[in-house]
């Protein structure tokens, strides 16, 4: 009987801790959405689901058929991400995208506003020697931006990791603060699936 009471007590503690963890995660997620809508914060969004890795050897910028593109599930995911922005009060944003079609399509399917191409968001996955130059180009561009309205940058895993140290999954949003003294500071990330 003593073992039963002990086991039951342990089980209750596990469920209680689990509930607290879920509540804390939900609270953090809501805080990140609120933060994203405030001044000097922006979203780095990894493009939605696009099966595979990198691009085919015949990759050509501007030619969809030579690139890895969003799957049907990726297209649905991008629309759901746009719905998440709207559900959290972000109906319009300044949207910039890598010139890769999987990023451009993700950005358009968010339906948060016109999509602007930004080469500083282009992937360097197959030209890793460009990592520093592309990352510095993005940092310079960000330093010149007045972020007083929601800003969404749709790019690739390698770019987000180089800039923030975060390894995002497809469709994950990394919330970043632009601080005049400290530069860029990761506030957290929002998984969208």
Image: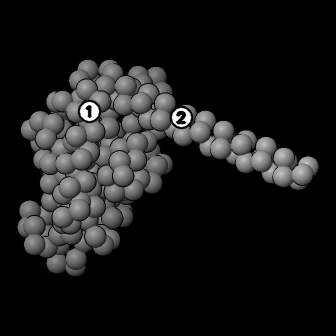
Task: Please give the name of the residue rendered at 36% of the width and 52% of the height, measured from the top-left corner.
Answer: 193
Q: Earlier in the sequence, mark 2 or mark 1?
A: 2
Residue 109 in sight: yes
Q: Farthest residue to the bottom: give it.
A: 57
Task: Please give the name of the residue rendered at 81% of the width and 51% of the height, measured from the top-left corner.
Answer: 7
Residue 175: mark in rendering: none
- Does residue 129 lie above or below 186 as drawn? below
- Does residue 169 lie above or below 17 as drawn? below
Q: Rate crowding at label 2 as few (under 14), some (14 to 19) or many (20 or more) other CA atoms within 10 Å.
A: few
Q: Where in the figure is residue 18, as x and y percent of width and height? A: 62, 43
* Left or right of 113, for residue 8: right
* Residue behind mark 1: 87
Q: Where in the figure is residue 97, as x and y percent of width and height? A: 19, 47
Colour scheme used in the picture? one colour
Residue 23: mark in rendering: 2
Splitting the image into 4 quarters, where does residue 35 fall?
top left
Task: Please give the name of the residue rendered at 47% of the width and 35% of the height, measured from the top-left corner.
Answer: 26
Splitting the image into 4 quarters, where does residue 62 fall?
bottom left
| Distance between the alpha carbons at the discs numbered 2 and 1 | 19 Å
């Amino acid at each position: 009987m003593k073992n039963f009471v002990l086991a039951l007590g342990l089980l209750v503690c596990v469920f209680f801790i689990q509930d607290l963890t879920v509540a804390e995660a939900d609270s953090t997620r809501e805080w990140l959405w609120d933060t994203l809508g405030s001044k000097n914060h922006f979203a780095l969004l990894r493009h939605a689901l696009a099966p595979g890795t990198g691009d085919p050897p015949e990759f050509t910028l501007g030619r969809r058929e030579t690139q890895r593109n969003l799957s049907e599930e990726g297209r649905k995911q991008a629309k759901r991400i746009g719905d998440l922005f709207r559900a959290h009060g972000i109906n319009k944003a300044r949207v910039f995208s890598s010139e890769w079609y999987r990023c451009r399509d993700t950005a358009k399917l968010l339906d948060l506003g016109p999509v602007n191409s930004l080469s500083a968001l282009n992937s360097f996955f197959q030209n890793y020697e460009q990592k520093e130059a592309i990352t510095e180009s993005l940092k310079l561009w960000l330093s010149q931006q007045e972020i007083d309205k929601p800003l969404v940058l749709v790019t690739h895993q390698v770019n987000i990791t180089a800039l923030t140290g975060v390894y995002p999954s497809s469709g994950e949003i990394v919330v970043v603060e632009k601080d005049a003294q400290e530069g860029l500071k990761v506030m957290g990330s929002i998984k969208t699936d």
